[in-house]
Amino acid sequence: MPPKSDSVEGIVLRFVNEQNRPLNSQNAADALQKFNLKKTAVQKALDALADSGQISFKEYGKQKIYLARQDQFNIPNGEELEEMKKGNIKLQEELVNQKKAISEVESEVRGLQSNLTLAEIKSKEAKLQCEVHEMEEKLNKLRSGVILVKPEDKKIIEENFSEKVNQWRKRKRMFKELWDNITENSPKDQKEFKEELGLEYDEDVGVKLQSYSDMLASLSKRRKVSR
């Protein structure tokens, strides 16, 4: 007589049949912790089920291995297995198609989400109109000859800029000479040595001395023309 489904033996029997693979008492006890079953109770249930012939078992030294009785399962023959394989292939193809369809829908949703709403478009339009208005005001002032920067302020800014660029050039040259002397006979790779010391070149932070030098040259040229 089979045990009640909610009894310890019933829970253990259902687990063994569902797993349908070799198990020891520790495997079963670990998996059945969610039912608050202790290992001793699980071991006792396994032995009782084995003694009553409801599950199979084999002894390997001191350890017992338990397995569901195979005569309770319908084992497919060769033709049935082949049909199952074909069905599995078909299901796999359907799964691939479903995943592709889901991916296309998700892509379409992301595209729709990236589009601006009508309220966002109006807000952006108002902001752009405000910026255009401010630019037009500045342009009108320039056209009317209004001086936006005082000549003395402009001169101070240009001189400061010239000094900073010259200092940059001077320090860059000093560093190169010092670096060449340090690394001339060093067996270390220069790139690795630089990273080890935590050094950064201008190019590493996205700036170039040459572009500022060109600006300085252009500034000097305009000064000469305006004199």
Image (tube, rainbow, N blue to C red):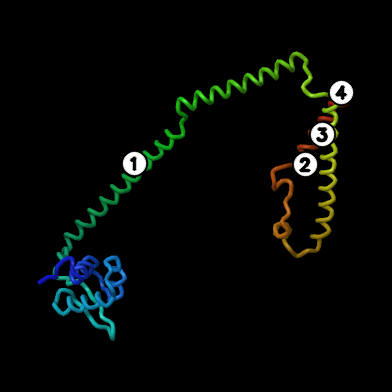
Mark pair 1, 4: CA separation: 68 Å
- Which residue does the numbered mark 4 point to in the structure image? 225
Q: List x then y, in percent, for residue 40.
A: 27, 78
Q: List x then y, in percent, for residue 138.
A: 70, 19
- Number of labels in the image equals 4
Name the residue located 49 percent from the left edge and 25 percent from the top edge.
121
Labels 1 and 2 touching (C-beta < 8 A): no
Name the residue located 53 percent from the left edge and 26 percent from the top edge.
124
Name the residue located 87 percent from the left edge and 23 percent from the top edge.
225
Mark pair 3, 2: CA separation: 11 Å
The residue sitting at the top extreme is 144
- Which residue does the numbered mark 3 point to in the structure image? 216
N-terminal label among 1 and 2: 1
Q: Which mark is residue 209?
A: 2
* Residue type indicated by callout 3: Leu
Quadrant location of the N terminus?
Answer: bottom left
N-terminal label among 3 and 1: 1
N-terminal label among 4 and 2: 2
Secondary structure type for disc 3: helix
Does 56 sit above or below residue 84?
Answer: below
Which quarter of the figure has residue 224? top right
* Residue type indicated by callout 1: Ala
Which quarter of the figure has residue 137? top right
N-terminal label among 3 and 2: 2
- Which residue does the numbered mark 1 point to in the structure image? 101
